Amino acid sequence: MNFKIDNLQYCNWSREIFQINKQAGLDAIHVTIVYHEDFDELKTVLKNWENHFSENSDLIFHGKSFKDIEKAKSENKTAVFFGFQNCSPIEDDIGLVEKVYDLGCRFMQLTYNNQSLLATGCYEAIDSGVTNFGKEVIKEMNRLGLVIDMSHSAEKSTIDAIEISEKPIAITHANPSFWHPAKRNKSNELLKILSKHKGMLGLSLYPHHLKDGTDCSLESFCEMTAKTAEIMGVEKIGIGSDLCLNQPDTIVEWMRNGTWTKSKNYGEGSKNKPGFPKQPDWFLDARGFENLEIGLKKVGFSESEVNGILGNNWYNFYKEMNQ
Amino acid sequence: MNFKIDNLQYCNWSREIFQINKQAGLDAIHVTIVYHEDFDELKTVLKNWENHFSENSDLIFHGKSFKDIEKAKSENKTAVFFGFQNCSPIEDDIGLVEKVYDLGCRFMQLTYNNQSLLATGCYEAIDSGVTNFGKEVIKEMNRLGLVIDMSHSAEKSTIDAIEISEKPIAITHANPSFWHPAKRNKSNELLKILSKHKGMLGLSLYPHHLKDGTDCSLESFCEMTAKTAEIMGVEKIGIGSDLCLNQPDTIVEWMRNGTWTKSKNYGEGSKNKPGFPKQPDWFLDARGFENLEIGLKKVGFSESEVNGILGNNWYNFYKEMNQ
């Protein structure tokens, strides 16, 4: 059986988007439900998701283990897995790790772009690695089955997390920096270590992570995928599109600035391009998976390898994590 | 006019202790009101302090500027200045810096022993210095007149804070590491930079910071003070006793473990000595200032230098900060 999984979306959720994802054939998505929200704010967000699930029960349900991906496939729905892009919801309290897991959350970035209490983000000048508290939290995440996501973390912190964690970790949405040297993209060295420890890379379709940005060609993306497969092994690669459909520009401003600065910070953007960038025309939404399928075959991947990249590899990762 | 100031106490507060401080002739104390408490918890602590002030109005009042030290002297009371030993009360929100200032807080450590969102604590393996958020918070603390305290911070972070801050910073309670190489004590290099930027060092009387611990002699402490004066200049030295009178051992356990670990951490203590250590017999409480006066004169300090160390130097620092 083949599964299609987009392992990172942060859309302005609506029935329309759930329908698009289903048209795209997605059996599972990992969605960002919070960035900088604390534990109480997380609970408010979860209530909104309860509404999404009850109002769109013909399309989606809350996914908690790999079995829910199988269930989604058989019921023609999309299983929605929850994740955080920062560790703010656990505040400074190790006890909250179990609580967020019990609330059905399955992925947590140890950092967003800045230093967190756990590790260093990719926008800090110096990277001190996983902290004392970070080591304790990794132990706890391992115990529970909460996936460590290092998409926005700095290099040493990411390598530390890979090596400290007793379970494979994920970089849910980033590309290799050999292709496009964004701060968020990852070095070959790091990708090799990730792969050696059975971790997964979700390739991103967010223009700031793409060579030539919005103008990136499907061919260029698929050639990069082929080179990445040479580095990591094709079975360690998936898709984490980082789609932010229908989000207003105020959201990307909030993602970058949170409440940590009084002056404006543009992160991956710039003063002239402060908002969300446009998607490449071959990946306007998840229906672009179809173009990826064609493009990946064109650069020489076999059908089974393409199916791996488009979902089966993530399915196997979930299977190992949630058992 | 001469002032006596103890620039760090964290006692289990009671009328008895306020009386002892007054007997010791203290015109001002800087007290730790929180360690790991968040903003809401801080507000609860402040309510308790309102009770202390109303029940002991003949002995203490809330100090907010150097003028309150003068007022305390003339009214034969002790002005109590509030400080935090961690940055937890500002959570991840730059807007809370002004709020804690408005609530009458005047000192904040950027870190306790671990990594914070602002900088690195002295118990972390690697010290990445002041973070992106830390730089923003320092700007805000400077603007308001909230003193940066780096007593529990790691070396590079402390030097960063000294150099980034436009106002002098304080190390309210620590000793030089040439005398006793505790992780909490400070290198000569750091002390020189601190002094160059008009910062102050409050010498600690907490046994874990003393050569020979509880058995440390008054003579040894005063000789260390003389050598420190050679490094920093005598006018940059004060006292920050770190007295924790009448605190139960559960408190030191909470200070060290907060909510960041499930296993036990002993910090400056050890499994065999987990609790509060005994004070040296010549500094059982603030009345030990009298012994210090004698001891400091004995090692060759002039009367005016001794008065500086026992309070006037801190008074001058407050004057510069709060004007």
Image: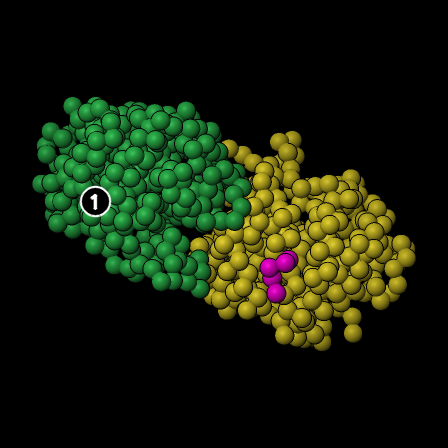
Chain colours: A green, B yellow
Q: What stretch is highlighted in magenta?
A: B162-166
**Secondary structure, magenta segment, majority class:** helix
Give the letter of the chain under mark 1: A
In the rendered structure, the answer to whether residue B225 lies left or right of residue A132 reads right
In the rendered structure, the answer to whether residue B118 lies left or right of residue B199 reads left
In the rendered structure, the answer to whether residue B165 lies left or right of residue B43 reads right
Rendering quarter of residue B192: bottom right
Whether residue B56 appears in this view of the structure is no
Membership of B187 in magenta stretch: no
Membership of B164 in magenta stretch: yes
Kindly state the secondary structure of the residue where label 1 is placed.
loop
**Circle 1 crowding by C-alpha within 10 Å: few under 14, some 14–19, many from 20:** some
Rendering quarter of residue A274: bottom left
Residue at figure coordinates x 88%, y 63% from the top left: B302
Residue situated in front as seen by the camera: A141 or A289: A289
Question: Looking at the picture, how far across and down is residue B83, in whole percent?
Answer: 58, 59
Q: Is A191 rendered above or below residue A259?
A: above
Residue situated in front as seen by the camera: B248 or B40: B40
In the rendered structure, the answer to whether residue B159 lies left or right of residue A220 reads right
Q: In which quarter of the image is the C terminus of chain A?
A: top left
Residue at figure coordinates x 43%, y 42% from the top left: A153
Q: Which residue is disc 1 drawn over?
A: A283
Residue situated in front as seen by the camera: B89 or A37: A37
Question: Looking at the picture, how far across and down is residue A117, in whole percent?
Answer: 47, 45
Question: Looking at the picture, how far across and down is residue A44, in whole percent?
Answer: 27, 52
Instruction: Give the amino acid at mark 1.
Output: Phe
